[in-house]
Image: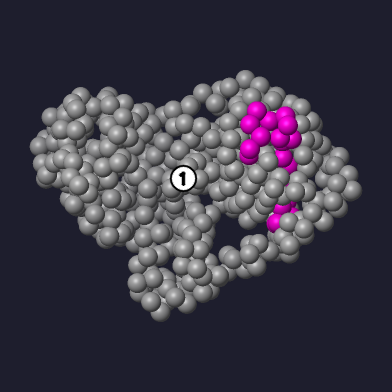
Amino acid sequence: MIAVGASWGGLKALRAIAHGLPAHFRVPITFVQHRSKESAALRELLQDCTSLIVCEVEDKQPIMGGYVYLAPPDYHLLVDGDEFSLSVDEPVRYSRPSIDVFFESVAERFGPAAVGVVLTGANEDGAEGLRQIAARGGLAVVQDPRTAESPIMPRAALRAVPTAQTLPLERMTPYLVSLDTGEENEQGRRKRTGGTDEVRA
Amino acid sequence: MVVPVGLGAADPAPAAGAEAIVTPTVTDIAAAAEAPVNGYSPDLERIEIQLLLEGIYRHYGFDFRAYAYASLRRRIWKRIDSDGLKTISALQDRVLHDPSMMERLLLDLSINVTAMFRDPGFYVAFRRDVVPALRTYPFIRIWHAGCSTGEEAYSMAILLEEEDLYDRARIYATDINEVVIRKAKEGIFPLDRMQEYTQNYLRAGGTRSFSEYYTAMYDGALFAPRLMRNIVFSQHNLVTDRSFAECNVILCRNVLIYFDRTLQQRVHKLFHESLPIYGYLGLGSKESLRFTGFEDDYEAVDRREKIYRKIK
């Protein structure tokens, strides 16, 4: 599972990521974007950039490869076994959906098979969730703050996980695709595993 | 075919092509168990949560065992953190020996956050697609299952009053939790939310001024007693209790998301038994009949707003 969190400036960043995903991409990828309750057009805007099916998650929807999932507005998104689940619990740090809530449940469920990606944003959501993904042996990826429309969220994520893989937006999708096809080398993996201990300490 | 997949990031060389689909394996889970967070592996956490829920069920009779795990887990940790405890076992110890702790946890686990005219589009669709049918009935019974503190039941009372149907309507508003039912009966809601509710009300197709419905007091907004006259608030447990009446409309919005799929199916069976043919079922905007086994028994009245009508 690739879990992607974005806030301010996220539309452009998410579109860029969706655009680069090949039609044969088999890893389920989920976008959690902060947005208002009324913003219903995000799914269509993302669907325009990819041949994968983009769907706004409904409660108990099975998690499958070949889909781009989108957290619905005004709900928290979580993973429960092989399904998604939703909640209307209080917003966390003023956000619902909360990136932290989603990332934490992804860390719990997928462990080392989780990839957390923190993109542009003007708050610190996602940092704690990314820390938990890394602590459970998953892979932490952060957009290079210098290339982010708003660097606050990626900076916070890097403070939480200093060993996170940092990439400019244009290299993000090729990197995620390389994970799917197993091109990531052993060196990268060792570095990651070593990094996990540092984070925990 | 449903293929749950994780990314095989821990596998040295995932197979090429379609075989790259990786079902999380025992190895994945074992690997996760080696990476504890707060001293917990996911496995140990699950064991302790199951023990806690089993203990609560056997000692107090509240059954949370078939609640959706991920949300339940968050709520349990919230209680642990706010009481300065360290482990789920420590919470279990407190809960089993101290009923007041059980009461607090019960509130944590069972309260659903709600709002007046939540999802205004739902009420617009209800006025447009359901109200015309209700007009043809001599008496209208509405069951609002999982009403929490009553905001949405009062919203429905307002809508029916504006449609001139409230005199012949009865809203049965139920919740598992007696504390919220007591609160709902008071009809007092926080003043600081009235601005939001007024916005919702207008977007929901409200035809009057929202402030006509409440009196601002120093500690809250008191809703007009006439709205309360045809609402029957009562305690009812969707998990263990049976149907209590045949209803023309059942509203159960953002309640079933806290249940696992098996329990959802059981509750849908209860709803199905409680509705006549052409009875209406209203769910939350991101809830679906798709994964419940009851999809073929209903037709969509408004697919987007999740209003369905029983056809068999």
Q: Residue beneath label 1, please?
A: A91
Of residues B184 and B2, the one nearer the viewer is B184
Q: Say above or below: A23 vs B225.
A: above
Image coordinates of residue A133 in percent, x first then y, are: 68, 51
Within 10 Å of the Cα at label 1, are there few (<14), some (14-19), or many (20+) other Cα atoms? some
Q: Secondary structure at mark 1?
A: loop
Image position of B140 (left or right of A19): left
Image position of B68 (left or right of B202): right
- Image point 50% across, 41% down: which residue? A95
Which span is picked out in magenta? A134-153
Q: The N terminus of chain A is located in which quarter?
A: top right
Q: Say above or below: B132 vs A27.
A: above
Tell me the amino acid under the disc marked 1.
Pro
- Image point 43% across, 48% down: which residue? A90
Of residues B51 and B209, the one nearer the viewer is B209
Tell me how many marks there are: 1
Q: Say above or below: A44 vs B254.
A: above
Q: Chain of mark 1?
A: A
Q: Would residue B276 be seen by someone viewing this image from the given angle? A: no
- Image point 49% across, 47% down: which residue? A92
- Image point 14% across, 36% down: which residue? B166
Q: Would residue B258 be seen by someone viewing this image from the given angle? A: yes
Image coordinates of residue B237 in percent, x first then y, are: 31, 59
Asked where in the image residue B100 lies, by quadrant, the reply is: bottom left
Image coordinates of residue B17 in percent, x first then y, are: 81, 36
Asked where in the image residue B198 lies, by quadrant, the reply is: top left
Q: The C terminus of chain A is located in which quarter?
A: bottom right
Residue A137 in magenta stretch: yes
Residue A61 in magenta stretch: no
Of residues B133 and B222, the one nearer the viewer is B222
Image coordinates of residue B297 in percent, x first then y, are: 38, 39
